[in-house]
Image (spheres, helix red, strand yellow):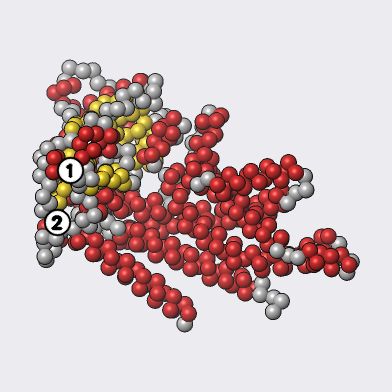
Amino acid sequence: MSMAWSTMLLKMGEGMLHTCAIFALTVLFSLPLGIIVMLLRRSRFKPVQWITKIYIAIMRGTPLMLQLLAWYFGPYYLFGWSIRGYRFTAIIIGFTMNYAAYFAEIYRGGIEAIPNGQYEAAHVLGYSKVQTFFKIILPQLVKTILPSVTNEVITLVKDTSLAFALAYNEMFAIAKQIAAKETSFLPFVVAAVFYFIANYVVAFVMERIEKKFDYYK
Amino acid sequence: MKKLLCMLLALTMLFALCACGGKTETKGDPAADSVDADAVDADYVFLEEELGVETYAIGFRLGDEELADQVSGAIKALVVDGTFEKIASKPEYADIKDFLCLKPEDFADETLPERGSGDSSFTFKQGYDQDYPPYAYMLDDGTYGGFDIDVCKAVCEYLGWGYEGVPFNWDFKDQELNAKSCDCIWSGMTKEGREDKYTWGITYSNNTQGILVAADSDIETLADLAGKVVGVQIGTSAAEMLEGDQKALADTFGELKTYETYNIAFNDLKAGAIDAIAIDMTTGAYLVSTAS
């Protein structure tokens, strides 16, 4: 092994920052976008519902790697636009659009799990629709969906490695380069530890949030 | 307490993994009872019989003749002034210099571009596969280097151009080139079979494709490969050769395994899971040189 440990950890740490950038921006954009998609999916106007259904079907039914390629190369092949400097944006768009679809379905599951009786009871008690949502539905919704959201977020940490398809230097891409250079598996072991620590932090934070919402007990 | 326990578990996992890694590295040498790390170099050899020769050249977008000519001219100038030879002789590039096909005397009569004759406002973007040592890879200090990158930088310096490296995924090299995120594909790319796909710059290497086996294996000729498991990296010239000119040979193999990178294939060879690797000799020499 001729590359110094410190260099290897430094390079992979740098890659980890890139990984975190993908992760943070995707979570930031896809969680709210998921709400919009969920609302459109539950729209009573049928065409909107169909379009949203098709969108979700495509996002869930095709590999994320292919979607990333489509987002990145699409503008050039479809419109002939220059894609210089667009790499990172394409990655964020790709991840956000994909994860929003999953989050939308998780939200929908949460909402549909709440029995109709509660809406009726709220109505009888004189709650308005907005009040019903914010005071009765939402507090229960958040509780129900949190474990599924945690699942999805942890998957996202590991999915960031798919950005290698667009030659973005996230942590796993760096690990692969060092492995090729050293003809060694050690960088992959380091990568595993990096991912494990990152996911442990995510799980820890999510557990804390779940505890916060641990009312009605 | 819980945190401590988790950290302990994580550490145990790490050590377990490390231990596994260690085992795979030595398992491939059944003959060597006590494995001497220094002796590993000699444990992998190329068969004397070769698969064939292919040439490496630089691919430009179709129609970019002017750019291709400029770069080729600058390379010839670097061959004449000795820079090219100096780069090729770096010890970390293993056997590269043995396969280069550019000699100063070939260009003695040609008019070559003057130093600094390029447009200084132009930045040349070299597209390369970042996982392909010794042509383009990550160096000890974490920056990108390799034979092709060194030569390209020298070309840009000679012509007075700016240089920008565009590392990409080899599977999508054509899309990157067409979409203009780089100006050329320059990392040990084989010309054969791709003649019409690019405007080609100068051919700089006659690379021999061979079969790498463990020194103690009973495989000595190409015919011995019958029924054996052979590994190859996807999209490489060796892989294309086994699907083209050497298809008849490939059909005798027990199995032809395609890998994402030669690194994984080489580890499989070390672990004894496959019997041989079809690979170009310069990349193979690099792998063997790092296996310790």
Work out whether residue B46 or residue B86 is closer to the camera in this orientation and state it: B46
Residue B104's place in the image compared with B166, above or below, is: above
Type of amino acid at the residue the image marks with label 2: Val
**Dot 2 lies on which element?**
helix
Q: CA distance from mark 2 to mark 1?
A: 26 Å
Mark number for residue B226?
1
Residue B11 locus on image (x, y percent)? 36, 72
Q: Can see residue B281?
A: no
Residue A111 is drawn in which quadrant? bottom right
Residue B4's place in the image compared with A209, above or below, is: below
Q: Which residue is disc 2 drawn over?
A: B40
Residue at the spot 66% in from the left edge and 67% down from the top edge: A144
Residue B186 locus on image (x, y percent)? 32, 34
Task: Characterize the local packing of mark 1: few (<14), some (14-19) or many (20 or more) Cα atoms within 10 angstroms.
Answer: some
Residue A71 locus on image (x, y percent)? 53, 40
Residue B189 is drawn in which quadrant? top left
From the viewer's perspective, tell me whether residue B41 is left or right of residue A86.
left
Residue A105 locus on image (x, y percent)? 64, 55
**Dot 1 lies on which element?**
loop
Type of amino acid at the residue the image marks with label 1: Ala
